[in-house]
Image (cartoon, rainbow, N blue to C red):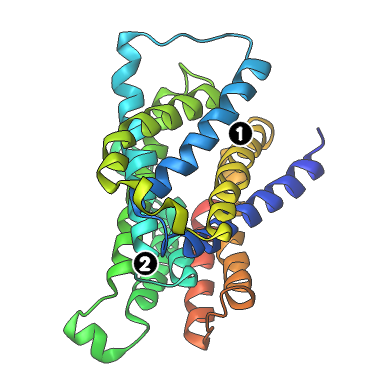
Amino acid sequence: MSNRKIYLLMVLSAFFWSGAFIAGKLSVPFIPTFTLTFLRFFIATTILYFVLKSKDKSNYQLTKKDIPIFLFTGIVGMFGYHVFFFTALKYTTAINSSLIGATNPIITAILCIIFLKDKITFKRAIGIILSFTGVFLTITNANLSTMQTLSLNKGDLLMFIAVCLWAAYSVFSKVVLHKFSPLILTFYSFLFCTIFLIPFVIYERPWTFINQVPYYSFLAVVYMSIFASVIGYLVQQISIKQIGPSKTSIFINLVPIFSIILSVTILKESISAVKVFTALLIITGVYICQKN
């Protein structure tokens, strides 16, 4: 596959990922957090199982030593991130959550500096400062009184926690990918997350509300499972293999741009000059950090 096709597929994946913020907003009012997360990963795990059978001929079998690894990736990276992500969408806008989500490469870079002994350069430091400034202005809406009283948006803070969990999963994945293929790591992370969610789903008693969920919420779940999870992850894996992780991660910068466009057109969320400015700060910071 040519690099040009990879670039086009990664742009498409960024679009799919941005759509997850819209799909989440259409789902969280009707489907509780644990049930919503379970449905997304149950569908995605089922699809990935057949993809794994057809694409990965190694037919990898789990060992006892693998269980702690997939417990971490499944609980922290999948369960933790998405529970905080869906909960955040109850209290904040899709635009805000996507802007904060765009700092994922920055948080990942910081964790790599701390745990993997990556070097911090002047450019990387500038990129981190710019991105965090953008996040802070997003959370406070650049309101001076909010900054003075530290009365922050609950949903934005939850989204920031979600990003930190996802970054921890990404850094941990770098450590264990020498043992597993990206497809196997993703599949078993999905599987462990799905299994871990079962008691939480039972607690939410989905049989009491499932008939009242509108059809478009179910369509949103299917969208998140197929397009944002399965297709997005697989394209990302192909891209990492062919053009490398650094170039691949640059496409994350497109997610908040697509999210803003979709949020305004579909959800009718308002866009202000402050949001545009904070988006530019975050994207510029991420770009500087990755370019370095």
Front-most of residues 40 and 9:
40
Query: How many residues crowd mark 1 within 10 Å: few (<14), some (14–19), many (20+)?
Result: some
Quarter placement of the N terminus: top right
Q: Tell me how many marks there are.
A: 2
**Which residue does the numbered mark 1 point to in the structure image?**
237
Foreground tag (1 vs 2): 2
Left or right? Give the position of 227 relative to 285.
right
What type is the residue that disc 2 sits on?
A: Lys
Mark 1 near mark 2, Cβ–Cβ under 8 Å? Answer: no
Whole-percent x, y for residue 291 in the image: 57, 53
Front-most of residues 122 and 142:
142
Whole-percent x, y for residue 53 in the image: 62, 16
> Which residue does the image show at 34% across and 68% down from the upper left?
156
Question: Is residue 70 at all visible to an observer of this figure?
Answer: yes
Front-most of residues 26 and 252:
26
Q: Residue furthest bottom?
A: 145
Q: Quadrant of residue 28?
A: bottom left
Query: How many residues crowd mark 2 within 10 Å: few (<14), some (14–19), many (20+)?
Result: some
Q: How far apart are the alpha carbons under marks 1 and 2?
A: 31 Å
Q: Quadrant of residue 237?
A: top right
Q: Could you say which disc has been placed on residue 188 in the image? A: none
Q: Quadrant of residue 139?
A: bottom left
> Which residue does the image show at 25% across and 76% down from the upper left?
152
- The local secondary structure at tag 1 comes to helix
What type is the residue that disc 1 sits on?
A: Gln
Whole-percent x, y for residue 261 in the image: 63, 72
Compare marks 1 and 2 and give the one earlier in the sequence. 2
- The local secondary structure at tag 2 comes to loop
> Which residue does the image show at 53% across and 65% down from the upper left?
283
Whole-percent x, y for residue 76 in the image: 32, 39
Question: Is residue 116 at all visible to an observer of this figure?
Answer: no
**Which residue does the numbered mark 2 point to in the structure image?**
90
